[in-house]
Each structure stands twice: as C-alpha cells, then as structure tokens.
Image (spheres, rainbow, N blue to C red):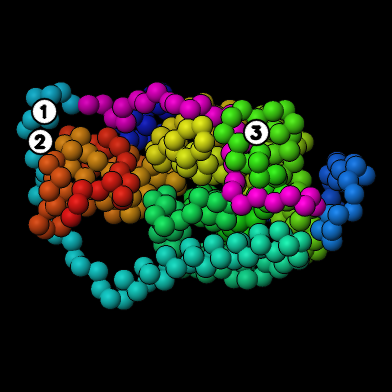
Amino acid sequence: MARLSDLIKRGKLPEKEKKEEVKIRDLAGLKETKKEEEVIKIVEEEESRSEEKSKLDIPTEAMEEEISELNLPTEAKEEELVEKPDEKSLESISLPSEEELTAPSTEELEKQKRIEDLYTITYNFIEDILNNLKRKQRFTIEKGLEIVSDIVNTEKAASILYGKAVQGKGIPDNLAAHSVNVCIYALMLGIGANYSREQLIELGITALLHDIGMIFVPEEIIKKSGKLTATELEMIRKHPYYTYKILQTLGEKYSWTAEVAYQEQEREGGQGYPRGLKGDEIHDYAKIIGIVDVYEALTHHRPQRKGYMPHEAVKLILGTQKDLFSNDVKRLLLTKLSCFPLGSYVKLNSKAICRVIETNEDSPLRPTVEILFDSRGRKLPKKKVTSLIEAPLLYITGTVYESDLPAK
C-alpha cells in the first residue's frame, strides 16, 4: 500500500472502505446524565481555593487577544506538493484551452454578500459576549444559535465563510475572530462527518464559545513574546476550566456545551489537559474543535513565528502532531479543510496566479482554478479556468495572499 505522504504528494487521498465511517456519538446521553464525578471533584477543588469574586465565580483579569499554548516548531521543512516534471517539460507548458467564465448574476452577488455578512454578524455576537464577561455580566446564547442555524441552513455558506476566514482580509487578529474561525472550520468538518442539522448547530455554537475562558488569562501573559514560565503556562492551562465555569451559568439546558468545551484541549493519547482523557473518553465535538483550534492558530502570526499557509498547516498537523488526534478527525481535516479553499489565491509552477473556484475532495491538491495573471504578472484579458486534475503538467507551488497580488 502506498504511504499516505506519497499519496498526498500526488494530490490523492487513500481509498476508504465504507465501513470506516467517522464515528458520531450523540449528545443525548451527555444532556441527560449528571456531570461526571471527576468533573465535580475538579470543580469543587478549584472553588475551594478561590474567593467568591463575582456572580460568575471567575477571575477578574481580562484579555483581548488569544494565544496558542501549543509548543509548535517555528519552521517546517517543505516537501514538494507533487512530483515535478523535468525542466524540458516545463518549457513546453502552455495553458489548456478553457471555457470562459459566465459573469455572476446580481442575485448571485447578493447571495455572496449576504453570506459574507454572516461573518461580521457572528463576530459581533461573540465580541458582545466577551465584553459582557469583562464587565462580569451575564449573557445568553439564543442569538448565537440562530446565527449558526443560518449558516448551517444556507447552501455553501460554510465553504464561502471558510475562504473568507483563511484569507483574513479585514479580519482582526483577536479572540473574537479566532472563535468565529474555529466555528466555521468545525462546521466544515462536521459537514464532512455527515452530521445532522441539529448536530451541526450543537457543534457550531460550542466551537464559537470554546475559548471564552481565555478572556481571564492575564494580558501580560498573552502578549509575552518569549518562553512562558511554568507559572504562566499553568495560567493558560486553566482556560478550559474558566470556560466550563462560564458556560455552567447558562443553566442545565446548555450544560452539555460546558462539558464539551471543557474537553477541547484533551488529546487522543492522553497528552492533553486538564484531565488527560483518552480516545472515546473525549467527545467527538471536542475532538473536532481541538484539531481546528490548532489549525486556526497555525495559520496566524505569533510573536515567535510567522503564520503558516493553509496547506502548510495541514501538513504540519499530519506530520509533527499526528499522534495527538484520531484518524477520523485527521481524515476530515485533510478532506474538508481543503488545502486550497474556495476563493483562495495560488501560484502554479508555470508562475501563473489563480483563484480557486472549485475543490475536489479526492484530489485536494489539484482544484479547479481561474487563471488571473500570467507568468509575468500580467492580468489576463479574458477570464479562463482549468482543472488541474486534467492538466498533469501543472501543479500548485504555494498560496498567495490577496494583498500580494500583482497590481491590476
């Protein structure tokens, strides 16, 4: 059997037998049963060591930016995405004859705008919650459930919002944006897992709220560019507990969100925290949120490193962190968080710059692209498209941010 890395290089995914479906566990049991004795014990121990500081029983220090607490490498050796043709072959490359794109209708443009506006609406919702927490005020999540439902019920909304989140244009780098991005990425994986509408809404709202406890990690720790001390690291590791306590104030109806969010830093082999849960002890929602949380953090700049391109982040997770996540969620990450999402910009080995207009789950490294600029950076007079699956001599060499496109 070919190695996974070799198949990825050729833009292919290994065939999966039907019986290897992603395992989905319903929340019914979680909603109906009482909290686990271990959770109660941990919570009681924390409460016994803390003063009654507010209605929410949470720390008073706040922050406005999020941080990745994972000890990730600052550089990764890049492998070629696919096998390169020889130099002589490249000299004779000419773009295939493509069909011209049809200009989008007014109705299509309006739908696109409405979907993109959902990002801002979601951002404002979570930002309001964070501001309430800073003032130690209570909040409700009904509006958030409506927003997530709108995303779930709107055709292609998750895919379009994914492209917007990855490009990051006009999106601030803070906790609210991180939360929205993780929500969108989690929905993409949930769709890949064939979740029901109800499950997608449960997953989406929990992903949106999963890191609100970070608001109470001291700001000086969040902004520190050097290595964290053991005490500082311990402060960051408390954020799942803070999130748990906050979400518990929503009442019994939403107690399941608190339990799932409490598990988002747990890892498959017991390497995570705060309880060192393993395998099936971790809820499937928490496993999905955990891996996309890492993906989101990797694709953004940090004081100690530059942000990775989307395809680089996927390769890094499947390489250096493969033991932290289950095979199911890794497969979902590779197939649903396409290395080159809709709307993203890429450069070909011919040096042409393109925009991704259609992805292919079976060959995620070879999408259909709209060619925008030729090898000399000149804008094409007519819009052209090509399927990289049907053009074996062409392949993607990297991602291009919109801000780095040639002047039009």
Residue name at image x 31 percent, y 27 percent: 80
Q: Which quadrant of the view contains residue 375?
A: top left
Front residue of 139/393: it is 139
Q: Which quadrant of the view contains residue 247?
A: bottom right
* Quadrant in which the C terminus is drawn: bottom left
Q: Which residue is mark 3?
A: 268
Residue name at image x 57 percent, y 34 percent: 225
Residue 129 visible from this viewpoint: yes
User: Which circle's residue, 2 or 3, is located before the other in the chain?
Assistant: 2
Residue 292 on the magenta segment: no
Mark 1, Cα crowd under 10 Å, few <14 / some 14-19 / many 20+, is: few
Q: Main secondary structure of the magenta part?
A: loop
Q: Amino acid at mark 1?
A: Ser
Q: Amino acid at mark 2?
A: Ile
> In the image, residue 38 lies at what x, y percent?
85, 41
Residue name at image x 16 percent, y 48 percent: 373
The secondary structure type at the circle numbered 1 is: helix
Q: Which residue is mark 2?
A: 93
Q: Residue furthest right?
A: 48
Residue 306 appears left or right of 355: right
Q: Which quadrant of the view contains residue 102?
A: bottom left
> In the image, residue 4 lies at what x, y percent?
42, 28
Residue 278 visible from this viewpoint: no
- The boundaries of the magenta stretch are 58-84
Do the CB atoms of the residues marked 1 and 2 lie less than 8 Å apart?
A: yes
Q: Which residue is mark 1?
A: 89
The secondary structure type at the circle numbered 2 is: loop
Mark 3, Cα crowd under 10 Å, few <14 / some 14-19 / many 20+, is: many
Residue 61 on the magenta segment: yes
Do the CB atoms of the residues marked 2 and 3 lie less than 8 Å apart?
A: no
